[in-house]
Amino acid sequence: MSSYKEHLDMKILDDEDDLSDDEVFTQGGKSIPLEENGVNKPLMAPRMRNKDTLHTKVRKVPSLRVLWAPILYFCVVLSSVISLIFLVVFIINIFMKNIAPSGHHSHGLKASNILPCSKISSEDVWVKTFPMLTTETAVRLNDINGDGIEDIILGFGTGADAFYYPKVVCHVYFPKAKDECGGGLLALDGKTGNEIWRHYSAHELFAVNCNIDLNGDDVKDCLGGGRMAGFVAVDGKDGSLLWEFDDQNAKIDASNVYTPQYIDDINYDGIPDLVVIHGGDPLKDPGSETRLVGRLLVVSGKTGRVLKWIEVPDERESYYSPQVLTHPDGVRILLFGTGGETHGGSLWILKLNHLLSGEINMATKIYTDKYKGIMTPPALVDINGDGILDVVMAMFNSSIIAFNGLTFGRLWEYHVPSSESYSTPGVGYFNNDSIPDFIINYQTGPGFPIYYYTQFKCCPVIAFSTEVR
């Protein structure tokens, strides 16, 4: 028995010698059962043997079709999009070419022959300065010295102007003015800029009209309206006084006189007479409740005598220079406005014969703003091709509105938010059609009297087939 057991133990030891190191650690010794040694798990996990150590793995490479397919799809989509864009542009060009006007501008040149300026240069012809003078007037042109060159007439003010100022101010600062030196009219030679004549008045003059010869000397004379009821007519040749507005029944000392408009010869003295607005209240604070009521005056062009006057129909203030429209039937229509910077008003039309007969109740308002007045005169120009002057206004309430000159219905409207304007629209051709366009000057800010900057807006007239009532 002992020899057999020894033989068995030796055989087991021989078998253990044949085990590898991994098998020893994972299986344990065969001579010692796991239960007897208290070991339930192998000492370490068996090593994974790589059966392919002698073989090289080959990676599968995608086919060219798989690589190029997305690129081809992208190129096809891109080509389609580009082709569609070219097609749309082509169709738009054809459409615009068909609707583009084939006519000429009013100045007779084809649009294709009009080239933009590539370089603009200027030089001073003459420069003149006038110490202690200010001006708010539009320049008027009139050949008053007969040299064939238009001369320049403008209104002016001085630092001395006030509702009342002592005469000694004029004696010290403007000795040639004698007792009145608040403003006046000034004529300059258009060729040299030299002063031709200067006429002093009690207050600033800013509303000038030099369209008619009043005294028969073949030189057009000048009317000047301005502050504190200032209104005079002066000889265009030498600046001497022809007449001065001084009708105490019609005159309001604190109110202004705005640009006079010539009408027919009402009193048959051979000289056209005038219609003018006498209004405004510059001595009152903005927003004050009570204002002076504006008046329409009919004045003799020859003598300055007031032929008729009447208050505006809504009994509001007025700063408007009136205008006259003539309809195809010969009826003359007076256009005027009421209201101020901080008070509402309206744009009115009134037949001239109703004004002369005192029938102010026949006036019709074609536009009203409850908060801001109608102060700036419009541009009168035909924009719908019917041969009648239409009305294009830059309102004080940020709006530019065009009215039909025959029916006074609204043609179109344009807005410039947060702005106000004291300027009449400028008329010109700014795009490629034969319809007049407009450039507008607007002040931007919280509102009168505070503005931060001025901006220009150009408003081409494109369509106006529908009137807005």
Image (cartoon, helix red, strand yellow):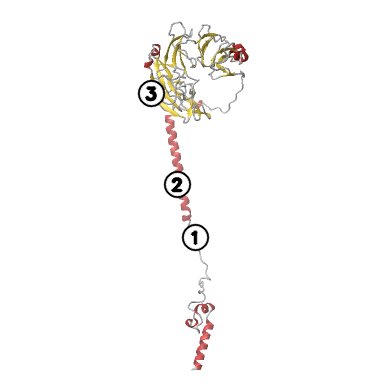
- Which residue in the structure is indicated by mark 1? 61
Residue 113 appearing in the image: yes
Establish if 35 lies above or below 299.
below
Q: Residue at x 42, y 14 (%)?
A: 310
The span from disc 1 to disc 3 (Cα, nearest Å) is 79 Å
Q: In screen coordinates, is 201 left or right of 326?
A: right
Of badges 3 and 2, the one in the foreground is 3
Circle 2 Cα neighbour tier, 10 Å, few/some/many (<14 / 14–19 / ≥20): few
Q: Amino acid at mark 2?
A: Val
Residue 79 place in picture, x, y as percent: 46, 45
Res 461 → quadrant? top left
Residue corresponding to mark 2: 77
Quadrant where the C terminus sits is: top left
> What is the C-alpha distance between the residues marked 3 and 2?
53 Å
The amino acid marked with disc number 1 is: Val
> Are the residues at dot 3 and dot 2 in contact (C-beta closer than 8 Å)?
no
Tally the marks. Answer: 3
Return the residue at label 3.
Answer: 409
Along the polypeptide, which appears first: circle 2 or circle 1? 1
Mark before the other along the chain sequence, 1 or 3 = 1
Residue 402: image quadrant is top left
- Using the rendered image of the protein, determine whether residue 382 is visible from the camera's viewpoint: no
Indicate which disc, 3 or 2, sits on the residue closer to the N terminus: 2
